[in-house]
Amino acid sequence: MLHKPAVQEGTDHAVAYKMRLGMIMFLIYAVVYAGFVAINVLSPILMEARVLLGLNLAVVYGFGLIVFALFLALIYNAMCVKKEKLLNTNDKNGKEGDQ
Amino acid sequence: MTLMPVILFVIFVAAVLALSFYFGNKTKSAKGYFAAGGQIHWSVNGIAFAGDYLSAASFLGICGMIATVGYDGFLYSIGYLAGWIVALFVVAEPMKRLGKYTFTDALDSKFNSKGIQLFAAISTLIVSICYLIPQMVGAGSLVTPLLGLSHSVGVIMVGSIVIFIVATAGMASTTYVQFLKGGLLIIFSTILTVAIFVRGTSTEPDQGGKVPFYPYKTVQLLETSSGVASADSTCRFVGGIEEISGLHFVRVRYNDLEPGWWIVKKDPATGMQTAEETQWVVQKEDGAVWINGRPASEENQLRQVGNMTQIDGKTGETGSVGPFKFLADLGSSESTVKRWKEVTFSKNEDNVTVYAPVYTAGNKIMRPGLKFKVEGTPLQKMEFISLMMALFFGTAALPHILIRYYTVPSQACARKSTIVAIASIGFFYILTLYMGLGAMTNGVVNLTDNNMSAPLLARSFGVFLFSMISAIAFATVLGTVSGLIVAASGAIAHDLLDRFGGLNMDDKQQVNVGRLAAFSVGLIAIILGIIFKGMNVSFLVGWAFAVAASANLPAILMLLFWKKTTAKGIAWSIVVGIVAAIGIILLSPDMYVRYGLPRDAAPIPFGQPGIISIPLSFITLIVVSLLTQPKVQKASS
C-alpha cells in the first residue's frame, strides 16, 4: 500500500502547467545567478564598477538577485492562481483540465 | 551580567513553554505531531520558515563574517536566499502533493521501496545532526555571557527546553516558536540597521560615547649599524625585525609594559619603515595569560576593533546617512578599512597570538575576494563556484525545511508560504550586509570571536537592544534546533521504525515513539554540544548543505521530471551523494589541517564538494535507473 499525503485535496488540474512554469522560472533565475558567479570568477574587478546611486556592481547585483527572486515568486504565484481558478473551476463544471 | 537580558530571556522561555504546554494537550495524532495537523495558516508558516531557516549560522555567522571579510560573507546571504527559488519553483508543491510527514515519504511516494526509506532517512539524520551540533555549541557560547552560566549548563538548558517543545506538541509548538522568533529577529534587525544609519560612520568610533576610541601608535623605524632604533622616545625596540607568517614584526617596549610585537611596514613610495602597535596574547609556560603587555584580568582584555581610517578620502564623522550612502561610502576606492590579521607562533616556550592591523581599500571590501580567492588559481575559482552551487541547491533539500510543507492545508498554501519566506528571509539577508558592515566600522568586533559581532554592535546602542538581540539569538537556536529535532524524530519514528522496520504502528504509538525519538535525539544533541565545546564547528553547516544538495536534490528533481527514475536509482544516488560529499570534505586540505596534518598531504586539493558530488549523484541516478527499468516499461518503449 502506498503512503498517502497528510491532507487530501481535490484533483488539481493545473499541476502540469505549474511544473512547466516553475521549471522555466527556475531556469531564468539560474541563468541570472550563474551570471553573478561568472562575473566574479571571470572578471572580479568589474564588480567594483559603480553602477547605481554610488553603489558598485557587486552590491547592485547581489541585492538585485534577492529582489528578483521575490519579483519572480510573485509573478509565479499570480500565474498559478489564475490557471488554478480557470482549470479547477472548469473541472467543477464537468470539463477536463490540463493534467 | 546585566539584569535586562536575563528578564527578557526568562519571559521568552516562559512564553515558549506555555505555548508548548497549550499545544501539547491538543496533540494526540501522528498528523498533529509530525505535521501540526496540516492546518497552519500559510502566512504563519512563511514566517516560521524564516524562523526555522535563519539559524545561528545565518544570523551570527554571516554578520560575523561580513564584519571581518566584507562582501564575501554576504555571498552566503545571496546563495542561501537563491536556494529558496529552487524550493518555490521546483519543490514546494510536489513535496506537498506527494509526501505525508517526512521528506522520505515524498521520495518514496511512487515506489514503497525499503532502499529509499532507509537511505533517505539516513540522509535526513546526517544533515540534521551536522546542523544540530553547531547550534548546540553556539547555544552554550551565547548563554555564557548572557546568563553567566557555564557552557555545559547552557547546552543542557537549551537541550531540555527544546526537548520539551518538541516532545509536548511536535510540529505545532515548533511552528509557533519559529514564527515568534522569525518575526522578532526581522523586527529587531531592522531597528538595529536603522540605528546604524542614524549614527553614521566615523574614523574614530567610540560606541556612542561608551568606549573611548583607542589611538594605536605608529612610530618611524630607523635602521642603524647595530640594528633598528625608534624615532620616538616612548617606544624602545627590543631586538631586530623578525619575519613571522609572511609578516614583519619588531618587539617594542611601550609605556614600560612588557614588550609586544609591532607590525613593520614599508612605504613603497618613500622607502620609510614604520612600526605599528598591534594587540597580542601570550600564554606563558606556567599557564598565565598576558594581554597587551599586562596580565589578563576583567579590566585588561583585548580591545574591540574595527573602523574606517578614510571615508571617501576624508576623516571624521559622516553624521546620519541613508542606506545607499552608507554602502557607497564604504565601497569607495578612497575609503580604507582597518581590519586585523591573526598570527600565531611560539616564542621561548610561550604561545603567542598577535592581532596585526591591515588596511584594505573600500572597493576591495565591497566585492568578493578577501575570503574567496576569485582572482586566484583555477582550483580556487572552482571552489568558489562549487560553494555557490551547494548554497543554491542545498536549501531546497534540507529535511527540516521540507517537512514544513506538510503543516499547511494545500499546495497553494505551500506555494504562498514559500513566497512569504522569500520576502522575509530576503529582507533579513539584506539587513545582514548592513549589520555586518556596521560591526566592521563601529569598533565592536571581538578579535577572538567574530560570531558575537551583531550582539556586540547592538550593545553599542544600549542595553535594551543588546538584550533583545541576545535573547533573539538564543531563540534562534531554540527555533532551529526544534525544527531539526522534529525532522530527525520523524526520520527515526516514521521512516525507519514504522515504514522501513515494518512495525505498522497505530496513530498513538507513532506519536509516543516520535516523542521518545525526539527525547533521544535531544539527548544526543546535548552530549555532542558539550563534547564539541570551544571548537569552531560552523563548517558542519557546510557539510549539511553539501550532503543535502548532493544526496537529496538530484533524487527530488529526477523523481519529478524524469519518468524513467526507479527506486534503486534514487536509493543509489542518495548513497553516492552522501559518500562523495563527505568523502571529498574529509580528504580536503582544510580537514587535513584539523587532523594536524600538512595541507599538501591532502589527496583532494579542494574542500567544496558540490561541483563534483552533485553531478555524480545525478549520473548515478540516471545510470542505475536505466539499468533497473521494469520489464513492462522496457517492452512498451
Image (cartoon, rainbow, N blue to C red):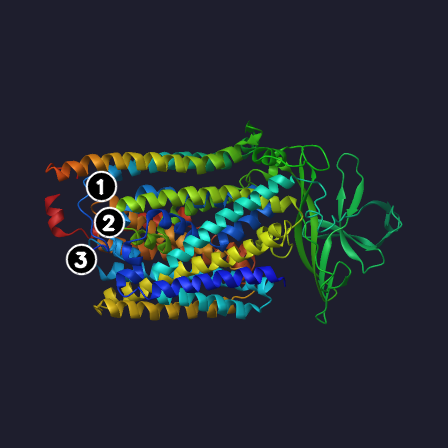
Tag 1, which chain? A
Quadrant, the N terminus of chain B: bottom right
Of B191 and B129, which appears nearest the observer? Answer: B191
Q: Disc 3 marks which residue?
A: A2
Q: Do the residues marked 3 and 1 share a common chain?
A: yes
Work out how far the residue at label 2 is from the one at label 1, CA to CA, in angstroms.
10 Å
Q: Disc 2 marks which residue?
A: B97
Structural crowding at the residue carrying mark 1, measured as other residues with C-alpha within 10 Å and reported as few (<14), some (14–19) or many (≥20): many
Residue B606 appears in the picture as rendered: no
x, y percent for residue B594 = 54, 61
Question: If you read the primary sequence from the N terminus, does the residue marked by circle 3 or circle 1 appear first?
Answer: 3
Q: Do the residues marked 3 and 2 share a common chain?
A: no
Q: Secondary structure at mark 1?
A: helix
Tag 2, which chain? B
Q: Which mark is residue A15?
A: 1
Left-right relation of B252 to B112: right
Residue B239 appears in the picture as rendered: yes
Work out how far the residue at label 3 is from the one at label 2, CA to CA, in angstroms.
14 Å
At label 2, which amino acid type do we have? Arg
Residue B321, picture quadrant: top right
Identify the residue at image location x=39%, y=63%: B20
